[in-house]
């Protein structure tokens, strides 16, 4: 099987993130594979081990993303591809989708996996956009996938419930938490990853002009959420508590 994973390099949200003049300060920041994409990498490896073939991980970004690609290779992926987007300033989801669509246009694909959302942007758009461009089936937020005779049997998370689907390959799916438990790269895996192929492609290699991947959105500002304030305990009888709560919601929280 030809199995691909589209993944993203994101900030480690468990680390402290600093904002300066609307921009994230990258000096000293920790970067990781987007956690939802780790589920996709793990499931791709499981499918390969069950059905044969190879797993290729693909990301759009600058050369710094090679570190996260090597991590995916150390987990067990076979090949990696970096689609350089340094020529495009402030790329957005359209930019990423355009680069990926150009890469996949001449590829034979059975399954493409990705994360349900990225923890930095949270739009969840790239996977469905790419599937639409490629003209293939897609299912988001999956928690199980089994493949037999060219058909994928899928469980999809729908607001806490489950939907069962059967779709024909090729298919693009995005992974939800609960799909699996991603493995940690082993020391032998890390050593092997250094010798696995990592291909770098730029716009010319993809037969794209800058205008073809020009972003469609503009980030106006970035800011950290306000610090949490101390809570209040409302005393008195039930009627008094309700009146005080409504008063506070109107005057302080300003949500009603």
Image (cartoon, rainbow, N blue to C red):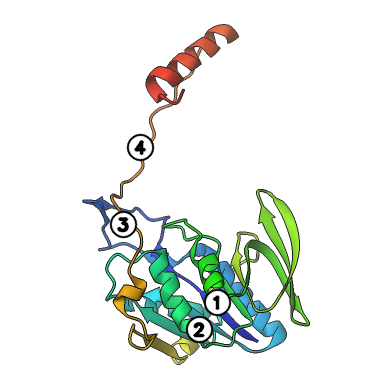
Q: Which residue position holds label 4?
A: 227
Residue 237 is at least partly visible in this image: no
Few, some or many C-alpha atoms within 10 Å of disc 1 (few <14, some 14-19, many ≥20)? some
> Residue 205 location, x and y as percent?
36, 88
Q: Of discs 1 and 4, which sits in the foreground?
A: 1
Identity of the residue drawn at 45% across and 91% down: 197
CA distance for labels 2 and 1: 7 Å
> Residue 109 location, x and y as percent?
60, 84
Location of residue 139 with respect to 109 vertically, above or below:
above
Few, some or many C-alpha atoms within 10 Å of disc 3 (few <14, some 14-19, many ≥20)? few
Whether the residues at callouts 2 and 1 have beta carbons within 8 Å, the answer is yes
For mark 1, give the secondary structure: helix
* Quadrant of image for the N terminus: bottom right
For mark 4, give the secondary structure: loop
Say whether disc 3 or disc 2 marks the residue closer to the N-terminus. 2
Identity of the residue drawn at 47% across and 77% down: 101
Q: Which residue position holds label 2?
A: 105
Whether the residues at callouts 4 and 3 have beta carbons within 8 Å, the answer is no
Identity of the residue drawn at 65% across and 66% down: 180
Say whether disc 1 or disc 4 marks the residue closer to the N-terminus. 1
Q: Which residue position holds label 1?
A: 134
Q: Of discs 4 and 2, which sits in the foreground?
A: 2
242 sits left or right of 98 in the view: right
């Amino acid at each position: 099987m030809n199995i691909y994973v589209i993944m993203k390099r994101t900030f480690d949200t468990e680390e402290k993130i600093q904002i300066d003049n609307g921009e994230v300060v990258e000096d000293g920041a920790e970067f990781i594979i987007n956690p939802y994409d780790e589920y996709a990498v793990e499931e791709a490896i499981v499918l390969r081990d069950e059905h044969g073939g190879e797993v290729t991980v693909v990301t759009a970004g600058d050369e710094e993303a090679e570190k996260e690609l090597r991590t995916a290779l150390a987990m067990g992926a076979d090949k990696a591809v970096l689609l350089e987007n340094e020529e495009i300033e402030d790329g957005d989801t359209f930019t990423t989708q355009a680069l990926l669509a150009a890469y996949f246009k001449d590829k034979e694909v059975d399954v493409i996996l990705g994360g349900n959302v990225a923890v930095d942007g949270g739009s969840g758009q790239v996977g469905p956009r790419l599937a639409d461009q490629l003209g293939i089936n897609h299912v988001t937020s999956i928690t199980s996938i089994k493949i037999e005779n060219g058909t994928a049997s899928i469980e999809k998370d729908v607001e806490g419930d489950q939907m069962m689907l059967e779709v024909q390959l090729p298919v693009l799916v995005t992974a939800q938490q609960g799909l699996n438990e991603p493995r940690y790269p082993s020391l032998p895996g890390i050593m092997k990853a250094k010798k696995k192929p990592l291909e770098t492609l730029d716009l010319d290699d993809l037969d794209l002009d800058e205008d073809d991947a020009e972003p469609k959105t503009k980030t106006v500002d970035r800011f950290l959420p306000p610090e949490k304030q101390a809570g209040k305990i409302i005393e008195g009888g039930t009627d008094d508590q309700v009146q005080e709560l409504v008063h506070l919601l109107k005057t302080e929280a300003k949500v009603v």
